């Protein structure tokens, strides 16, 4: 994994993933663990800044090709099909991730525009970023981020809900302000 043998890191990744799957060290969870190893390898080799490439969706969609590629190596030592599969998985997933990030940025800009137009006195870049850090927000998040004290934080979230930017959902004594548009963008 760490040797300098001149192989392209993505080709090396394909080989590492195959080797891990061939060893199959755990009774359960080998696929998930293998995909985590893939992402960590990409980060370690400077090909990703953050572990945000979700290869599982691609692999699940093209599961028969996945197993066919692994089998071709095991039975016939044919690596080309497998390497091409892994390269396509990374490329396709990277483009999907870029699209998703662009969509989330557009949503953030929409929130920003609505807040600046309708209630400019509560606008702050920190507030916008906070309501996009998680699929939901609550008063304590604003307090912890030092955006507002409890009463003001409560008012800010109620205002965002009144603008249909967040959806208040009460669970027990807590009110969660759900960012439905972010959930949709992430799913």
Image (cartoon, rainbow, N blue to C red):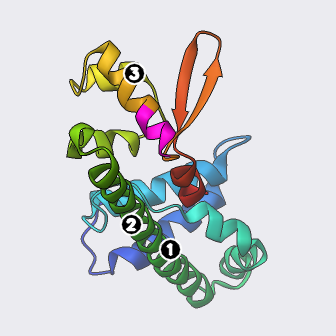
- Determine crowd level at label 2: few under 14, some 14-19, many 20+ residues with C-alpha closer than 10 A: few
**Rounded to the nearest whole Å, what is the CA distance between mark 3 and mark 1?**
36 Å
Task: Determine whether 155 is above or below 101 in the image.
Answer: above
Residue 185 in the image, given as x and y percentages of width and height: 54, 60
Residue at the front extreme, as displayed = 118
- Determine crowd level at label 3: few under 14, some 14-19, many 20+ residues with C-alpha closer than 10 A: some
The residue lying toward the viewer, choosing from 141 and 35, is: 141
Residue at the right extreme, as displayed = 64
- Determine crowd level at label 1: few under 14, some 14-19, many 20+ residues with C-alpha closer than 10 A: some
Q: Is residue 68 left or right of residue 38?
A: right
**Which mark is in front, 3 or 2?**
3
Task: Determine whether 158 is above or below 151 in the image.
Answer: below
Q: Mark 3 points at which residue?
A: 154
**Residue occupying image coordinates x 65% and y 54%:** 31
Between disc 3 and disc 2, whose residue precedes?
2
Q: Mark 1 points at which residue?
A: 96
Which numbered disc covers residue 27? none
Magenta-highlighted residues? 159-163
Residue 153 in the image, given as x and y percentages of width and height: 33, 23
Which numbered disc covers residue 106? 2
Asked which secondary structure carries label 2, the reply is helix
Residue 20: say if magenta.
no
């Amino acid at each position: 994994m760490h040797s300098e043998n001149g192989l392209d890191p993505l080709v090396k990744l394909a080989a590492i993933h195959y080797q891990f799957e061939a060893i199959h060290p755990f009774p359960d969870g080998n696929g998930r663990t293998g995909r985590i190893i893939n992402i960590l390898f990409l980060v370690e080799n400077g090909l990703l800044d953050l572990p945000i490439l979700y290869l599982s969706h691609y692999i699940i969609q093209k599961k028969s090709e996945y197993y066919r590629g692994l089998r071709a190596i095991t039975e016939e030592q044919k690596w080309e099909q497998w390497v091409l599969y892994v390269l396509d998985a990374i490329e396709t997933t990277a483009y999907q991730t870029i699209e998703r990030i662009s969509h989330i940025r557009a949503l953030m800009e929409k929130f920003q525009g609505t807040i600046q137009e309708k209630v400019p006195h509560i606008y702050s870049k920190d507030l916008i970023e906070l309501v996009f850090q998680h699929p939901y927000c609550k008063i304590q998040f604003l307090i912890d981020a030092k955006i507002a004290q409890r009463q003001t934080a409560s008012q800010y979230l109620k205002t965002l809900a009144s603008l249909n930017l967040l959806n208040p959902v009460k669970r027990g004594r807590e009110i969660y302000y759900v960012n439905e548009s972010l959930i949709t963008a992430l799913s």
